[in-house]
């Protein structure tokens, strides 16, 4: 990928490295952290070099009468206006510049606009959120109603204590995973994986690990909208999946229905609450229709935030035969493996390059009980 803003825009920090070199550096970094627990070969899943991001956020920079997209500078000193962004998906790229032209042609659209967010699918659906420092009125709604048709997009307006949804507040992604089409309804402001190509590779890697476990019941914490849960559910008898976000749980339950999956119970619980429920420390009304005693978990998947697992969750999953751990922070993964390696051994490890041209790297390990 080439970009005229390399070196000034802070979005891509590894701009001086060729992509193959970036991957080698990331593989070496993760391998070094995992070395006390795993010495085998690591699977490396690369990304397209450009047009890989299906989610993007841009500031709006006002200079006189003109608006431009802007990103934070690499040197952390303010912002840089941009004229291209080759990392965004084609679905976003073809709309973002047309939208900017419409913004600059309309006082209604540009006044006190401070950011624009894009969420797109591999099937060319796009949801645009425009964020303002003013209350949006009927004139704004009228202009945007027309603009939606021109851009073939859903558009949402947000300001303080205000959200205007003109039609839908979601896009519907369709991914081909392990021989099946999986449908994901992805809502505005909900978490979605940013790189769909690498996301497919990540899910299929997890499926390959799950197939080694021989079925049984499956537990998942930090399940989000069911990104892993729904494709993996086909390889288990019963599935219990938890997530703290109400919006994500709503989307996950909807995605279950869209995919005709009936063996998953999605419950809104934090990882700490999930542990309290499963160890009998505390009862939750949210679980009144679920008999926890019927589950016999053979496998657990965790995909925690950058802080990694809390101690109670680590102790809980230490009692489950197989663990699939997806990590967005290899440092906390290595920390958690210090505890998990007392009961389990790492049988497989992988990295997933969701974010080319940056230091960030996703990784995964598959562990089995000693």
Image (cartoon, rainbow, N blue to C red):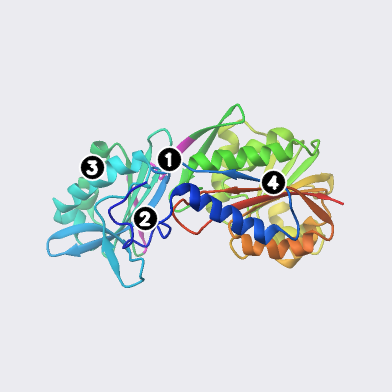
For disc 1, the marked residue is: 171
**Mark 3 — residue?**
147
Gap between marks 2 and 4, in whole Å? 36 Å
Q: Secondary structure at mark 2?
A: strand
Residue 6 vertical placement versus 153 (above, below): below
The answer to whether marks 1 and 4 mark residues whose Cβ atoms lie closer than 8 Å is no
**Front residue of this view, candidates 251 and 7:** 7
* Residue mark closest to the camera, 2 vs 4: 4
Q: Which residue is tagged 4? A: 41
Region rendered in magenta: 161-173
Q: Is residue 331 found inside the magenta-colored segment of the image? A: no
Q: Are marks 2 and 4 in contact (CB under 8 Å)?
A: no
Q: Are marks 1 and 3 in contact (CB under 8 Å)?
A: no
Of the numbered discs 2 and 1, the one sitting upstream in the chain is 2
Q: Earlier in the sequence, mark 1 or mark 4?
A: 4
The structure residue drawn at horizontal position 81% and vertical position 57%, both measured from the top left corner, is 318
Mark 2 — residue?
A: 57
Q: Residue reaching furthest right?
A: 370
The residue nearer to you, when weighing 79 against 31, is 31
Between the C-alphas of marks 1 and 4, the distance is: 38 Å
Q: Residues within 10 Å of mark 1 (few under 14, many from 20)?
A: many
Q: Are marks 2 and 3 in contact (CB under 8 Å)?
A: no
| Residue neighbourhood size for the residue with mark 3, other residues' Cα within 10 Å, grouped as few (<14), some (14–19), many (≥20) | some
Q: Which is closer to the viewer, label 3 or label 4?
A: 4
């Amino acid at each position: 990928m080439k970009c005229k803003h390399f070196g000034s825009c802070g979005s891509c920090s590894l701009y001086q490295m060729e992509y193959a070199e970036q991957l080698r550096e990331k593989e070496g970094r993760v391998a070094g952290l995992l070395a006390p627990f795993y010495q085998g070969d690591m699977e490396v899943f690369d990304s397209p070099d450009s047009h890989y991001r299906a989610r993007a956020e841009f500031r709006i920079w006002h200079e006189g009468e003109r608006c431009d997209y802007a990103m934070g500078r690499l040197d952390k000193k303010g912002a840089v206006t941009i004229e291209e962004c080759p990392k965004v998906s084609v679905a976003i790229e073809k709309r973002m510049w047309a939208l900017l032209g419409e913004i600059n042609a309309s006082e209604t659209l540009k006044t006190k606009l401070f950011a624009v967010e894009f969420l797109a699918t591999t099937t060319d659906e796009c949801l645009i959120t425009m964020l303002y420092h003013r209350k949006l009125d009927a004139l704004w709604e009228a202009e945007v109603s027309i603009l939606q048709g021109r851009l073939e997009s859903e558009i949402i307006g947000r300001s303080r204590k205000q959200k205007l949804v003109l039609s839908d507040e979601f896009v519907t992604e369709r991914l081909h995973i392990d021989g099946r089409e999986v449908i994901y309804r992805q809502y505005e402001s909900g978490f979605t994986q940013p790189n769909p190509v690498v996301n497919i590779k990540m899910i299929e890697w997890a499926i390959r690990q799950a197939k080694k476990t021989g079925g049984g019941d499956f537990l998942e914490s930090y399940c989000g909208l069911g990104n892993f849960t729904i494709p993996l559910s086909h390889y288990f008898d019963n599935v219990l999946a938890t997530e703290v976000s109400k919006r994500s749980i709503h989307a996950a339950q909807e995605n279950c229905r869209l995919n005709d999956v009936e063996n998953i119970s999605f419950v809104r619980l934090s990882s700490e609450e999930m542990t309290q429920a499963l160890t009998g420390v505390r009862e939750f009304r949210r679980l009144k229709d679920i008999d926890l005693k019927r589950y016999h978990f053979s496998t657990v998947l965790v995909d925690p935030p950058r802080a990694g697992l809390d101690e109670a969750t680590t102790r809980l999953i230490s009692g489950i035969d197989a663990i699939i751990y997806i990590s967005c922070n290899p440092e906390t993964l290595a920390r958690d493996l210090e505890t998990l390696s007392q009961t389990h051994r790492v049988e497989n490890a992988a990295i997933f390059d969701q974010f080319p041209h940056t230091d960030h790297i996703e990784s995964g390990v598959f562990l089995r009980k000693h």
